[in-house]
Image: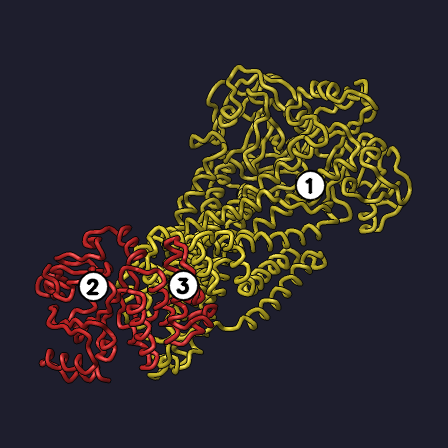
Chain colours: A yellow, B red
Amino acid sequence: MLHATLKSLLSRKVRLVLSGLAVVLGVMFVSGSFVLTDTMGRSFDQLFASVYTEVDVEVHAAAVTGDLGATSTLPADRLTQVRATPGVASALGVVQVNGARIVGANGKVVPAVTGTPRYGRNWTGTSDLVLLRQGHGPAAGDEIAINAALAQAAGVKVGDRVGVLTRVPKKTFTLVGIFGYSGGRDSLAGTQEIAFTEPVAQQLMLGGPGRYSHIDVRAVPGVSAEVLRDRLNGVVGPGYEAKTGKQMEAAESASARKDLNFVNNVFLGFAGVALFVGVFLILNTFSIIVAQRTRELALMRAIGGSRRQMIGSVLAEAVVIGLIASALGLAAGVGVGTLLAYIFGNTGGSELALAGVSVPPSAVIAAFGVGILVTLTAALLPALRAARIPPMAALQEVATPDRPLTRVTAAGGFITALGTATLGLGLSGRAHSNTLWLILAGILIGFIGFALLTPLIARPVVSGLGRVLSWSVPGKLGRRNAARNPRRTAITAAALMVGVALVTGVNVVLASTIHSLHKQGDTMVKADLIIAGDPGDGLPPTFDPAVLTAAKQIPGVRDISGEYLDFARVGGKDTALTAPTDLVATARMFPMRPVDGTIRALSADELVVDNKLAKEYGLHAGSTVLIQLSHGRPHAMTVVGVFQATEVSRGWYLSPASVRDFELRQPVGAYLRLADGANLAAIRTQVDKLLADSPEVSVGDRSAFIAQQTAILDRIVSMIQILLALAILVAVLGIINTLALSVLERTRELGLLRAIGLGRGQTMHMITVEAVVISVFGALLGVAVGTGLGASVVRALKSQGIGELALPWQQMATYVALAALVGVVAAILPAIRAARTNVLAAIAYE
Amino acid sequence: MTASSTAIGGRVAARAVGVSKAYGSGETRVLALDQVSVAFTAGRFTAIMGPSGSGKSTLMHCLAGLDAVSAGDVYIGDTRVTGLGDRALTGLRRDQVGFIFQQFNLLPTLSARENILLPLSIAKRKPDAEWFDTVIETVGLRERLRHRPPQLSGGQQQRVACARALVARPEVIFADEPTGNLDSRSGAEVLGFLRRSVRDYGQTIVMVTHDPNAASYADRVVFLADGHIVDELSDPTADAVLDTMKRLDGRHPAIDMAEAVG
């Protein structure tokens, strides 16, 4: 039996290669992500091992709150204490705080390499790790040294005067030294470092003298790091802690690996799409193969083969394909993973020395597990169908009557309903921690349901669609061919539908978001000018608070309110909160309707909050809540007012007095309202001048502000297009596959058509129309399903301020046009094959 | 002209001049046609007969431009078919040749009417409504025009195929065992149409068959054996054809005759 299976497998190589390719792609992404994360992870291990080579124990302030990102500070007297502790050979007070940004030669702030900090630190001299390349370390207050990669990115050289933004507004320094790291590295995986003299570093980064971020301790020979750590933990007292260099290394590496998870998930998402679409492809191929082999299988049954053996024979084929595809996918994945690790390690200023590439066992297991499982799953239905072929079929004329679509449609309806319900439950937000999974499962199940419903609508839609293309006889024949096997057409089109639906869905949500923001901006926001920066990643951009005072003096400015931002812990939850400089002005520009208490200027330890949060935390006017800001002790704050939450005004508003305990003591944004008849352009120019030393932010009107805030969404859109490209690639394979099989099945018809005078060009035209009809059908389905999906997400996001459904017509039209193009491309090979049909061979009998 | 005496007195619609056709090469070389010369007069119904392996189908394929000849020349009307490229051959098939096959070879996606008009549609020619009506009337398909092939009986399907060949009024129609898949009654009907289209409308038809009864509908029968034309009859009867076959094939008459009679 196995022998027969392999024989039949070999006789259909091309077909199986095509359907296997989808699995190869999926497995490639799976194993590629494993190889990538493994390689990057080990590279990070190496990096942090080199960073902590000279540190036996590190002493720092214990984190007060969870994950607030607050800078830990310890006073200088702890350094004295540590130095006096027996077993300590040397102790170095280090200032190292994220948020030192250099203004490059082009006047712009050098952006952070994705995910890496921009440290401002004290110059602690050269070491085994830090090596001077040029000049010397900073010795005077206005001198700095920076790492070589940063100097290159900023386009500055020793002797230049350069502006630096820190936790205080821009100051200008002389660049006196450029340093690098052991191993000839220009940066530590892209991290930017600006070294000041110690007092300056303390002032700029920690807000005052006599403070350090942490203390690096070396033990005297004979004292182990662990012993010294325990001893130091006894010395430094509560609120501070000592950890060994090894512990720090492990923690930092673990956190870097955690960041990789994002990349990993993106890849697994791609793999999921490729494999999901691949299931359709394989299912289709096996269905057609089983249909073509009906007589052969019936004969086997007639001569004594059992149902089990029939199923086994089909599944054995699936396993062989799965094995081969997985092996190929694994090989491709190792290649792709390595290549990407190289790219990630060497682009955008990130400079990570790569650890050697190895293939982790997890990659191999995942590759073969996923590949074989997916293929088997897809082959299961056709296998069961093969088992149902009666022995009689061997004796009868091969008749493939149109099986009624009732059952498949009923199943499709049920599964679609199930998917919709799951999605609905997920979007309702009632499922809490399972929300994402419910949404994903809902989408997945929904897709399967839609795919099952597709055959029902395939014939009418394809006929209607084809009419547009059938101005000629070949076109008409192609359209008829596309409609003749609704199941096959449907599954082929469904493969394309999945990709297009996903992308359309995301686009609908994003377009609606942007549209809603614009609408809210126009109707609800009364601010005329807005100062803000690109949120980007890392710390939010800030500007000089003096700008607020100066701007207030500009004639024609009626109101101005700056906003400070902090991440705090309120009632056990980490949350962002705002401190406006002028709450009353803010309330005028972002209308706040009090529902309890009053909205008025706040004094220290007073706050206002929106009614939803108030309800969540059980607060009302007059009650108090304990808030732990980034620094200082927890404050018991009194609620003076509760306002109606709207799309534009919600959250916690604290008094300006709270800012002293914020991590960032510079405003992140400001809103201006002008007097009636004031010249907006002129005032804007004046404010722009005030911002000359704050290159991270700019002033603009509402629409400019919204465009700035939504820029990140555009980036998401372009990332999503990659997903589309992948899904389309797999779908193209599916269309080629279906067409190739159809051409094969219709050899006799093609021969006849050629015999009665259909030219080669006309034959190709006919096949192309069939392909285009199928692909456009798939794209239309995708656009329709994606719109539905997007619309339901938008509905669910109504409470998040996205109330307006906007359809990205342009993108939708592009996808359909793209699908038509895809059809033409997919038709090329089958069409050539059809045109080459040997007339005589095709019409000759048996 | 060396072809055949019966060609004298009529325009020649198709002819083969010294046509040879060999398959394979070297040791395995098989000569299917050996210097065959034959002409088919316009407006006549000719049957090509011969036992299995005699080369009759090969001759027809070569005449119709479906297969390339190894030596010799083939003409359809005044056009020399030998050496034409695919484009010209396609045009020739489209405009000057009609086919009727044993397996009816209709397109299952098209209705009977669309199948009949397909050659004209492909050629972008407008059907002559009067002629179309005449053809439909002749084959008796008026009530079935909207049906699709799977909804028609075998005889009806073959009648659609006949109509398809007739409607374009080609120079010559080649019919390859047109009754091979039909019961005797349907077969007789189809052969009747073919004869009528020759007698009444002047169509030229060349039919390959191994059925003496089918051959008896023709005006002339050409006998082929081992790649040579060995005999011919004019205005044959089934018995005359059978006699000739018996006489010609002394080597294994039992098999072929049993087949032919059965």
The residue lying toward the viewer, choosing from A10 and A370, is A10
Residue A251: image x %, image y %? 56, 45
Q: Which is nearer the eye, B52 or A286?
A: B52
Left or right: B88, with A494 as reference point: left
A499 vs A687, left or right, is left
Do the dots labelled 2 and 1 sit on one chain? no
Which residue is outermost to the front?
B9
- Spot occupied by residue A1 in the image (x, y as percentages of width and height): 33, 75
For the C terminus of chain A, the image quarter is bottom left
Q: How many marks?
A: 3
Q: Which residue is mark 3?
A: B132
Q: Residues within 10 Å of mark 1 (few under 14, many from 20)?
A: some
In the picture of the structure, the residue carrying the numbered disc 2 is: B41
Amino acid identity at mark 3 = Phe
- Circle 2 packing at 10 Å, graded few (<14), some (14-19), many (20+), is many
Viewer-nearest of discs 2 and 1: 2
Q: Which residue is mark 1?
A: A515
